[in-house]
Amino acid sequence: MCGIVAYTGPGDAVPILTEGLARLEYRGYDSAGLAVVGRSGDLRVRKAAGRVAALAASLPARFKGGTGIGHTRWATHGEPSDDNAHPHVAGTVAVVHNGIIENADELRAKLRADGVVLASETDSEVLPHLIARSAAAELEDAVREALSQIVGTYGIAVVDTRHPGVLVVARNGSPVVLGIGEKEMYAASDVAALVRYTRQVVHLDDGELATIRPDGFRTSTLDARATRKEPSVIETEDAAYDAEGYTHFMRKEIHEQPAAVERALRGRLDGRFHTAHLGGLELDPREARAIRRVKILGCGSAYYAGQVGAQLIEELARIPADAEPASEFRYRNPVVEADTLYIAVSQSGETYDTLAAVQELRRKGGRVLGVVNAVGSAIARECDGGIYLHAGPEIAVASTKAYTSTAVVFALLALHLGRIHDLSPADGRRIAEGLRALPGQIEEILRQEDRIAALAADLAKYRSMLFVGRVRGWPVAREGAQKLKEVSYIHAEAYPASELKHGPLALISPDLPAVAIVPDDELLDKNRSTLGEIRARHGRVITIGHTDAGEDSVVVPKNEPELDAILLPIPLQLLAYHAAVALDHDVDKPRNLAKSVTVD
Ligand code: F6R
């Protein structure tokens, strides 16, 4: 969703801001804008609904400045329009804002009553007015005063022509990262906008603000207590944010899975005790033994990967485990138990529903681990401990490599917990060997891409599809349906294969193909009889499993049955991708969807 970039230094801010905003496009946006303080001290603002490239192309040559802020907006208050785009301006002050100001109506009414003319319908516009009205001598104090009147979430960046060379940024629930350069400084809502310029970053905490000048920065809390921050180094290479010859990031990320899985496994398998070492768990064996239940929380694909995780933990560690959408959990006043281990799953580490579930759990004294991809993200920082995916940046809206890496990380966690409980060394070794085989087996599946693409192009003619699976195949079916609908817009519904005869069998017809997840496990015969029921009603069946059933089947290599749910989704990712390509959709930016859902 929304993105922020800011710069102060000897260079021209404009190309840095426009390039940075382009790097944030993947998150989803509808408008973009810039404000820079010109060398003569004047404020120059350009903003418009539409793409960053169009905005950049519309800038006159004289649009330059040494200090500036930029923004990509995802509309929440007021439609996408030039007026509603950020930055918002009041006199000498310009502000970009991510997040939601809950008391905006009240603040807007107060400003209007004082004679202020508001130019937009946004919640964010109150900020520059509140800052501009402050009598404080320092910009930082004026921002602090304004923020004390705000109820809601924010990541903001502020410039004021009365304070040349100064940027003030602040964070509460919406990320802000500072980038340290050579006599120049950057800030952004996502390191993606910074990696081209610097690898030294500082993540602000909630309730913190920073005053940034070209030669450095100082941080403090909202109540003006100074804080100390240690810079960290961004691991990711700049190239990871490029499509590197691929037409779409989604396809690139599907093909990155062998390497991503290798990274998720690296240094984590123990050949002596046939277990897994997970450094960030913060859970000693005694504490691990005391866990009576595991509850996994995430949204969308992260939730489905969590469902795979719950099955793995229950199978390998014999600890009762289940997954629930974080977006539901947070609203149902959940009972929080001391001997339950809660695990929050998130690629971005910013999904608001998941973050709110974690905060609710922590408030009630629950122990929460994070299974997160984005290092230093809000969810990672909020948890008691956790495991990073190390999948590298995921740019396409549809999650692929992060989904697979999450399932792999859960297999490691299940192995670790299993070996503390009753999983035998022989079974531990069997699972560890299975995990080591995954990257090569994913390569084998990817080599079938042309066949899967042909199948997808044929399936793209249908308006609706059914995805069915049993037990280990059930989260796979859900993820397959999710991928297809997200990028191809073909209606897809997932059902447990066992439930078909309790209702959905009524839908079966030649117009509704069924994609069936049929691993060669102890349920194969049951699955075969379900497929018989579909075929008897003239339904087309496409099988994803270990048996070659001709044209309408995709065969994945056999691994340990417990790990089936890691390999089986990969053909479904390719199926969804190629169906979307066949239908000529913008695969990386599906309609109505954003990469990080940072709003309530
Ligand atoms: C699906 C997809 C979404 C995300 C969900 C959670 O392809 O990308 O369903 O999985 O919005 O996002 P994260 O994992 O960033 O919390």
Image (spheres, rainbow, N blue to C red):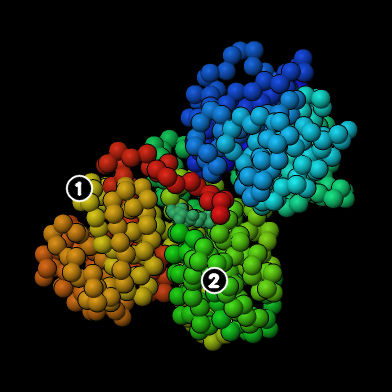
The front one of 345 and 98 is 98
Question: Does any portion of residue 547 appear in the rendered image?
Answer: yes
Compare residues 227 and 274 and report the one nearer the observer.
Answer: 227
Give amino acid for label 2: Arg
- Describe the element under mark 2 as helix, strand or loop: loop
> How many C-alpha atoms fall within 10 Å of the one at disc 2: few (<14), some, or many (≥20)?
few
| Residue 99 horizontal/vertical position (percent) | 62, 46
Tell me which residue sits at (50%, 26%) in the image: 53
Q: Quadrant of the N terminus?
A: top right
Q: Position of residue 495 (x, y in %)?
A: 30, 68
- The quadrant where residue 389 appears: bottom right
What residue sits 48% from the left and 30% below the top?
50
Q: Residue at x 64, y 31 (%)?
A: 118
Q: Position of 252 compared to 129: left or right?
A: left
Residue at the (53%, 51%) spot, across then down: 597
Which circle marks residue 332 in the picture?
2
Which is closer to the viewer, label 2 or label 1? 2
Residue type, numbered disc 1? Lys
Total numbered labels placed on residues in the image: 2
Pointer 1 residue: 461
Quadrant assignment for the C terminus: bottom right
Q: Is residue 185 visible?
A: no
